[in-house]
Image (cartoon, helix red, strand yellow):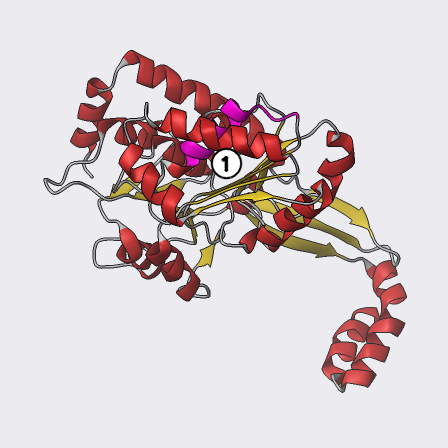
Amino acid sequence: MSEAEFSAAEKAVTPETKTAVARSLANIHAFAKRGLRKDWSAKNAEGATVGERFTPFDRVGVYVPGGKAPLVSTALMTAGFAQAAGVPQILAATPCDTSGVVNPALLYALKAAGVTEAIKIGGAQAVAAMALGTKSIRPVDRIFGPGNRFVVEAKRQLVGAVSIDLLPGPSEILILADKTGNPHFIAADLLAQAEHGGDSIVGFATDSKPLLAQVIKAIEQQLKTLPRAEIIKQVLKSGTFLLQVKSFDDGVAICNDFAPEHLSLITAEEDRWLPQIRTAGAIYLGNDSPVAVGDFLAGPSHTLPTGGSGRSFSGIRADQFQRRTSMVRLDKKSVAKSLPVVEEFARIEGLHAHGRSTAIRLEK
């Protein structure tokens, strides 16, 4: 993408869009900077100085989906974290329309989030281009961002050729509520996530039979008012589950097995149940915490693990944009204290040069 395209985008977007981008970025930066790792050092048992140094990656790539909708917020919640971490080169890949045009609001957000280079490529080929490089695209050190099943599979296959963040695929939500849940709010959150379409997964579990019936009724009523109703209907038909569980404990167990991208937890006993949730990518607490605020504004990245990967991955964090390097410094005294242990390991492992390389520093 040319500088002229970015300039044109800045002129085309409304003041309201610019304000929304600025407010979201402010929260993202504030959240991200709290999560950055700081250099540290300490003395070990033998008196050697050990520690870690954290530096930003030199060049990262962010993938921003744009086929069905211009995901302006995703541009901020990937590149914005890189910007906060001080990454000097941020490459963005996003698909364009059939005329070669990218949505101006998305372009504006990319620029505001510190993107230094952008390419009009979508899908698995965008991931490959960023990971391996082409004649016109230099490869990156690490790739971030969500995508469809093909993007996720491309990232999985390229692990090793490049570092990746996680495997964030189609959107997921699980709402776990007891009888205190507001059925209208719950229905609205379910419909909001179904609006992503495609392979999205939308789930609701409750131990309250009356609440389940009220939520189903509210979904039917609200669906009639939504512009993307046809897309939502497809998800409601093929990617939705509504469960009445025997106990709230069963609902928690289902959540930990499912490892949802987004969990909305609504219960009068929050202090009891929240500590038992172990695998959710992000948790929204109470009736008045819409997932949409997290999607657009709250500060944490909405790029989160899906497809059960929350059992071993977390969402994008600021420290993922930092390279960690360990540091070790010894003096003669700490070398002398270390030598007996080093020589014993060298003997056990048959690596005699290791022991010699330490002992030689104490010889006159």
- Front residue (pair 320, 282): 282
Image coordinates for residue 203, horizontal then vertical, percent? 51, 42
Quadrant including the N terminus: top left
| Amino acid type, label 1 | Ser
- The one nearer the camera, 239 or 329, is 239
The quadrant in which residue 300 appears is top right
Residue 189 is covered by the magenta coloring: yes
Q: Up-down: is 167 above or below 7?
A: below
- The residue that disc 1 covers is 301
Which quadrant of the structure image shows residue 360? bottom right
Q: Which residues are magenta?
A: 180-193
Image side of residue 208 versus residue 341, left or right: left
At a point 81% along the width and 78% down the height, the residue shown is 345
Residue at the spot 13% in from the left edge and 41% down from the top edge:
100
Would residue 47 appear left or right of 253 to someone viewing this image?
right
Vertical comparison of 102 with 125: above or below: above
In the rendered view of the protein, which quadrant contains the C terminus?
bottom right
